[in-house]
Structures are given as structure tokens and as C-alpha cells.
Image (spheres, helix red, strand yellow):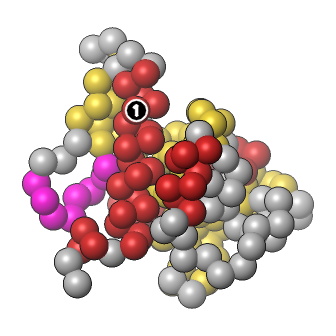
Amino acid sequence: MNWNDRTEVKKGDIGERIVKNYLESRGGVVYKPITNKAHHFDMLFSYNKTQTIVIEVKTQERLNRYKETGITISHYKDYLRIKNIPVYLFFVDYSTKTVYGNSLDILSQEYLKDDKMFPYEREGSSGTRVNFHLDTMKTYTKLSDLEIEELKRFTTKKEKYKI
């Protein structure tokens, strides 16, 4: 199967498009990789020619039973190695109908919530992940009904959300 035909890639492309449109609406310029192979991050965003940040988009729903979301530990470590340029994670989440996230600097700070120290490592079906509490996220924009329906078509979740 071609990489671009995979369900999670199609869903990720939708999320990247949503975040790109949001960032451009804020008045900046978005730069995306032009090489058609695996890349270190999804895009760069330059605002007013004075600030440039790395943007990584995760098109996924939050955890169903906990007020958390996360990324693979390998990606987390990759992003931590980026120096001298801020890294921002954006989560496109149809279950909350929003795009939320924050800078990796903020998300990496220890945060005690519900007797749990965040971020923390968690074993899951797709390997080890680093989880962040949703209270450490900023909401950037709401998803339109059309965007929500488009994302739902590519969901791989079997359990309905109880939010």
C-alpha cells in the first residue's frame, strides 16, 4: 500500500491543512517540506518576519477516559533535540471539536494533576507514549462541522467518546 493511501496519513493531512489555514489566518507564513519522504516536523511558521517556530500536528482524539493526550516517546525525544527554535504541538481533535496545543517548553514542565505527575510515559498498543494533561493546552480554534465529519471518516477508534 502506498504511504499516502493509509488512513492515518489521510487523516493527518486533513489536520495539517486545518492548522496551516489557522496559522495563515493569524497573518504569518507557513513553510512545509517539499521532499516527499519522512520529515522531522510538519511545518515552520514565521510571524511578522521576527519569530519562527516549528509546528508539529497530531490529528488524534484525546484519551477517552482521561483528560490527556500524548505522542510517541521517539517523537517527543526528537522534538526535545531541536534547539534555538520553539517547537509547538497542535492536536486536531474531532472529539472536543477543537485544535489545541502548546509549546513543548510548557508541555515538558512537570505538572501535578489528579495525583499524577505530567508529562509521563505510558505503554499502549502503539508503543510507549508521553502523555500531557489537557489543562496544559491552549485552545487555538474550533473545528467546523464539515471538518469534524471529514475527520470522523478516517477515525480508527472503536469506542465512542464519553465526553
Q: Which residue is mark 1?
A: 21
* Along the viewing direction, whichever of 88 and 27 lies nearer the viewer: 27
Picture coordinates of residue 96, whole percent (x, y): 70, 51
- Is the magenta region chiefly helix, strand or loop? loop
Picture coordinates of residue 64, whole percent (x, y): 75, 69
With 24 as the anchor, is 30 left or right in this view? left
With 120 as the anchor, is 34 left or right in this view? left
* Along the viewing direction, whichever of 23 and 81 lies nearer the viewer: 23
User: Does residue 139 appear anywhere in the picture?
Assistant: yes
Magenta stretch in the rendered image: 35-42
Identity of the residue drawn at 61% across and 76% down: 157
Picture coordinates of residue 86, whole percent (x, y): 41, 36
Identity of the residue drawn at 48% across and 68% down: 154
Residue 41 lies in the magenta-colored region:
yes
Above or below 118: residue 101? above
Q: Quadrant of residue 99?
A: top right
Disc 1 residue crowd, few under 14, some 14–19, many 20+, Cα 10 Å: few
Q: How many marks?
A: 1
Q: Secondary structure at mark 1?
A: helix
With 111 as the anchor, is 5 left or right in this view? left
Residue 27 lies in the magenta-colored region:
no
Q: Quadrant of residue 32?
A: top left
With 24 as the anchor, is 32 left or right in this view? left
Identity of the residue drawn at 35% across and 66% down: 9
- Quarter occupied by the N terminus: bottom left
- Quarter occupied by the C terminus: bottom right
User: Does residue 119 appear anywhere in the picture?
Assistant: no
Identity of the residue drawn at 15% across and 64% down: 37
* Along the viewing direction, whichever of 17 and 136 lies nearer the viewer: 17
Q: Amino acid at mark 1?
A: Asn
Above or below 70: residue 84? above
